[in-house]
Amino acid sequence: MPIQTRRSHDGQTQIIKIEGRFDFSTHQAFRDAYEHGGKDVCGYVVDLSEATYLDSSALGMLLLLRDHAGGDNASIVIENCNNDVRKILTISNFEQLFTIR
Amino acid sequence: MDESAAESDPLTILIADDSDSDRLILKTLLKRLGHQVLDAADGQEAVALFRAGAPDIVLLDAMMPAMDGMEAAREIKRFAGERLVPLIFITSLSDAEDLARCLEAGGDGFLSKPYNRVMIKAKVNAFNRMRLMHQALSDQRDLMHEHNRQLLEEQHVARRVFDNVAHTGCLDAPNIRYHASPLSVFSGDVLFASPRPAGGMLVFTGDFTGHGLPAAIGAMPVAETFYGMASKGFDGSDILREINQKLGRILPKDMFCCGAMVEADFAQNQLRIWNGGLPDGWLVHSSAASYRLPSRHLPLGILSADQFNAEMEIIRTLPGDRLLLMTDGVLECSNEEGQLFGEQGVRRAVEGLGSTRHPFDALMTGIRRFTGHQKFGDDLTLCCLEMVDEAGLATLTEGAAPSTLAGPTEWKCVYEIQGSTLGEFSPLPLMLHICMEVPGLRRKSGEIYTLLSELYNNALEHGVLDLPSDWKYTPEGFGRYYSERATRLGKVSGHYIRFSFHHEPMQWGGRLRVVCEDSGQGFDFQSHPVLQATEMAQSGPRYSGRGLILLKRLAESIRFHEQGNRVEIAYDWYF
């Protein structure tokens, strides 16, 4: 599976880890990963340490997650991006919407 | 697919055997299995029957007079063409080479003599299954070809409709060079350019997420908004705000549009640029030095109106400076090894320029060399805008023939904006709109817009904001001027700018009088060089030489009142 999900130790954060290419082919799996997270989730972490590539439809999916998680009130962290992925997030100025670290 | 062609359907089977008795036995056997039989005594007859009867399966004796089985097999296969007609050799041959020759001649399999009812039934069924599968595949392929043909046709029709809405505007101007695939709209790229009513140009490049129809549909309202607002005199920021809001409303959450808006002011040698999500733009000076213009904003269609920042970066330019804009298709061009052209490729092409090479050519050549293709993908848009002398460019045409409706000819109107509104709102499009109700003025929209914007900008910048115009004319002062302008605009209070319009019919046409007053300090118009002398001086304390000269040239008369914070102009139009 290119997408793995788990809960943080305190149980409040859903951690979504993406492996390989983060593009349209992962659309359904990514959606499942946050929609089936449960109602008690307070925040999300998208772990991109194993993601090699990210395209504009992945950016769209991140926007969907943000909307799902409460829009402007969403707490979403995108972490461990490689340089290429980071570059794409920077060009689109997604740091204005997500915490990127 | 033909649903009725089930496995159990009776078949038409052609048999050819020169032995009358064998042929009769086989014929009887097949008829008993429920099939129709065409029978031939030699190869020639077999070929003739095949042409006439279009059988589903052929059983052929390998050795026959007149034309032997091999020859007949070749003829039959040639005639069948794309249709798969299983051809089975009936033979008593057992030598491997002989059997191989049968297959080479087009045979699909063998049946050995003497005939065995069970074997014949099984063979016929097996080959019939193969035939049906082939038929199904061919039908599906044809269907797909047909669908694809229809789709392409629809795209061409859609393209024509799209072109009417999202025409290329003034992209054919001599100072613009661009590459955009003719079908790029279905890859989500857009490129628009429009002259502004008072001179200058607006260019917008965009790249929608996704491909195909959804991306093309998103492009339509962007085109309409861009061209509609640009021709009414709205500036780049206004248009960006409108596009952002419209896209936010109509696009699904995961769709957005990366884009860059450029406002070129040739007279003042200024560029304003806003880049949201597109790769770095590049400004290449005529000296070949170059500067990156990175994306500083989120793409369009994501943020709500109150969060959206449409502020454009102001860049001072010189004639001959060139601006490159591109969509990420440029960075994503790949060579045969799968490596990407990337930012590095662009940087190398731009920075390796001599002073004579056009950056557009350099980049296009760079991409061609890198990819090894003369043609490249659909989703690549590249545009180069050159700063030039305005006089060489076609501006908005003086419009259509005057309307037969007279429109309002005797009217007055006062419009005053106050306080913090001065910092947030431009009254120019609205005021232009009011004047354009007069058909005689509509033909002169460019001149009217220029008059109004010169009056307004002077009142705002030098009256209300009290900015010294001479700052703008040194490179150091330029940046200071605009940062100070932004700071002071944010703090405006207790000020106003008031426009009074008065239009009346004349025997030659009509006269529009505009009075522009502001709450600023005014200036010493009595001793201003442009107003005093016929020779043109370069600067003044409040009106820069250029603005005032423009007003004097366009208007019938210009008069200053009070301490210089009240200007009155008269503009005549003729039938």
Image: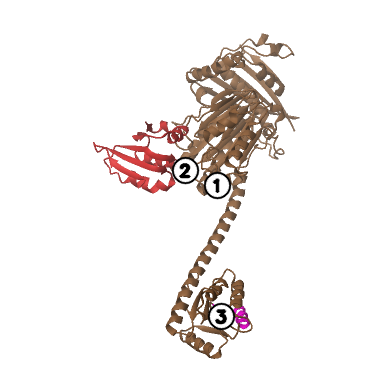
Three-letter amino acid code of the residue under disc 1 = Phe
User: Are labels 1 and 3 on one chain?
Assistant: yes
Q: Depth check: give the residue in front, B115 or B532.
A: B115
Distance from the alpha carbon under mark 1 to that under mark 3: 57 Å
Q: Depth check: give the residue in front, A26 or B545.
A: A26
User: Are labels 2 and 3 on one chain?
Assistant: yes
Disc 3, SS: loop
Residue B271 at what x, y percent from top left? 59, 26
Q: Given this view, does label 1 or label 3 mark the residue nearer the observer?
A: 3
Q: Are marks 1 and 3 in contact (CB under 8 Å)?
A: no
Specify the segment rendered in magenta. Answer: B43-55
Image point (43%, 31%), residue name: B307
Instruction: Say which colour chain B has.
Output: brown
Label 1 neighbour load within 10 Å: few <14, some 14-19, many 20+: many
**Residue of label 1:** B186
Three-letter amino acid code of the residue under disc 3 = Ala
Q: Depth check: give the residue in front, B544 or B9.
A: B9
Disc 2, SS: loop
Left or right? Give the position of B100 relative to A48. right
Find residue B251 and name its label: 2
| Image-quadrant location for residue B349 | top right
First in residue order: circle 1 vs circle 3: 3
**Residue of label 3:** B62
* Residue B16 in sight from this viewpoint: yes
Residue B169 at what x, y percent from top left? 64, 38
The chain that appears red in the image is: A
Distance from the alpha carbon under mark 2 to that under mark 1: 16 Å
Distance from the alpha carbon under mark 2 to that under mark 3: 69 Å
Disc 1, SS: helix
Residue A77 at what x, y percent from top left? 35, 34
